[in-house]
C-alpha cells in the first residue's frame, strides 16, 4: 500500500472560458475589419498592405488579450 506523493491536479474553469472569449473576440474583430474592406479596398495596394498589417497587429492591444491571458493563468485581471 503506497501513497502517491504527487498532488492531485484540478483543472481550472478559467482556461476553457477564456479560450471561448478569445475566439469570440477574434471573430468580432474579423467581422469589424471585414466590414471596412470596401473602404480599404479603394486604397492603393501598398497602403492596403500597411493598413491590414497594422489592423492585424493592433487587435492585441485594443482587445484586452494580455489581461485575459493573465486571468486565465492566475485568476487575477492585472496584466504581467
Image: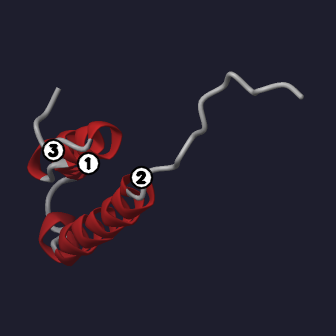
Q: Residue furthest right?
A: 1
Q: Quadrant of the N terminus?
A: top right
* Residue wearing tag 1: 56
Compare residues 61 and 75 and report the one nearer the observer. 75
Q: Is 70 left or right of 17, judged from the image as shown?
A: left
Compare residues 61 and 9 and report the one nearer the observer. 9
Disc 1 to disc 3, C-alpha distance:
6 Å
Quick check: can you spot residue 49?
no
Q: Earlier in the sequence, mark 2 or mark 1?
A: 2
Label 3's element?
Answer: helix
Instruction: Give the numbered dot on residue 74.
Output: none
Q: Quadrant of the C terminus?
A: top left
Q: Is residue 76 above or below residue 32?
A: above
Disc 2 to disc 3, C-alpha distance:
23 Å
The 10 Å Cα crowd at callout 1, few under 14, some 14 to 19, many 20 or more, is: few
Q: Is residue 30 above or below residue 18?
A: below
* Residue wearing tag 3: 58
Compare residues 69 and 5 and report the one nearer the observer. 5
The 10 Å Cα crowd at callout 3, few under 14, some 14 to 19, many 20 or more, is: few
Q: Position of residue 52 (x, y in %)?
A: 24, 51
Q: Is 27 left or right of 44, judged from the image as shown?
A: right
Q: Position of residue 14 (x, y in %)?
A: 36, 55
Label 2's element?
Answer: helix
Q: Residue furthest front?
A: 1
Q: Is 45 left or right of 62, judged from the image as shown?
A: right
- Residue at left offset 33%, top offset 59%: 22
- Residue at left offset 21%, top offset 39%: 66
Q: Are marks 1 and 3 in contact (CB under 8 Å)?
A: yes
Closest to the camera, between mark 2 and mark 1, is 2
Amino acid at each position: 500500500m503506497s501513497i502517491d506523493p504527487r498532488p492531485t491536479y484540478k483543472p481550472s474553469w478559467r482556461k476553457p472560458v477564456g479560450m471561448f472569449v478569445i475566439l469570440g473576440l477574434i471573430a468580432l474583430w474579423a467581422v469589424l475589419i471585414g466590414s471596412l474592406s470596401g473602404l480599404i479596398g479603394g486604397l492603393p495596394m501598398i497602403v492596403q498592405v500597411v493598413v491590414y498589417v497594422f489592423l492585424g497587429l493592433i487587435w492585441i492591444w485594443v482587445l484586452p488579450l494580455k489581461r485575459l491571458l493573465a486571468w486565465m493563468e492566475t485568476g487575477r485581471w492585472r496584466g504581467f
